[in-house]
Amino acid sequence: MGHDHSHTPHSHNDLKGKNLFISILLNVIITLAQVIGGILSGSLSLLSDALHNFSDVLSLIISYIASLLSKRKATSNKTFGYKRAEIIAAFINSSALIVVAAILIFEAIQRFINPVPIKSGIVIWMALLGILVNGFSVLLLRKGAHGNMNMRSAYLHLFTDMLASIAVLVGGLFMKYFAFFWVDPLLTVLIAFYLIYVGAALLKDATRVLMLFTPNTIEVKKIVAVLSKLELIKNIHHVHIWQLNEQEIHLEAHIDFKEDIKLSQFDKVLNEIEEIVFNEFGVNHVNIQPEFGKCDSKHVIVQD
């Protein structure tokens, strides 16, 4: 038995998908421009930025598809629908960030060993184009990045691209006016380490959700302690708390009652439980198994 407190505004989801689609088109343009510019100039940092942008195109496409799938309704053989599609997209995208970073570091080391002169003028103009395009895309996705892991992964890809373009611009200026060509692979390494930093954090969050771990914001013992204070409850055990996606947190538990109560009495207790866990802990889906004198494990956490 349970109750759903969650709400999903369709207009916001539609705007989210539209903004993602625009960002995909913009990133395709900037990727092609930077690949051409990188080849013509010989700049590794510009090519690395282009590679990063290409990974963004793929990640944005994944995010866009996941956003569309998440709107599909549940069916008899997909009772949760595709609500986890966006979490899977976030997992893939964050993994891609780390892989791209590793490739960039390898290429930068090669460039440190064998430095080459670079046509800094092309680098500067391509970096400026990257800043403008990625900056606009960041603004498009900024609002949707709050409270949605999939959108946050897409937003982070674009935000790091914008920072990378700024770094490439600074490097281009140093190469143009001071002939510091070693700045190019150095910036590539710095960009790569930042990708690893943001990618690892997002990968950790997505993994926690996919592994059905209890959200960091919730303490199981605290919920049990609060609910145990209700008059008719003798014991709360076999507790599971997990996140289906970023909008839904589920609580499942067995509850021993002090008396052999009627179903109508249980409904009243259930309503109390739902209101408490929603208002105090943000849990919006509750499934309780009522028991009276049943012989089973009374531990709070039970390995199924």
Image (cartoon, rainbow, N blue to C red):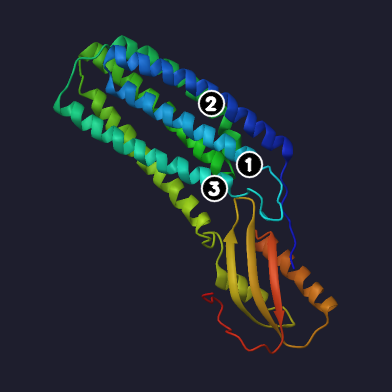
Q: Are marks 1 and 2 in contact (CB under 8 Å)?
A: no
Specify the quadrant of the image occupied by residue 68. Answer: top right
- Give above or below for 210 relative to 274: above
Which disc, if any, is residue 87? 3
What's the residue type where badge 3 is placed? Ile
Q: Residue at x 20, y 15 (%)?
A: 117
First in residue order: circle 1 vs circle 3: 1
Q: Secondary structure at mark 3?
A: helix
* Image coords of residue 290 (percent x, y): 72, 78
Which disc, if any, is residue 69? 1
First in residue order: circle 3 vs circle 2: 2
Horizontally, residue 217 falls left or right of residue 100, namely right
Horizontally, residue 86 falls left or right of residue 49, namely right
Instruction: Identify residue for label 2.
Output: 24
Which of 272/299 is in front? Answer: 299
Which of 200/83 is in front? Answer: 83
* Image coords of residue 109 (percent x, y): 20, 32
CA separation, marks 1 and 2? Answer: 17 Å
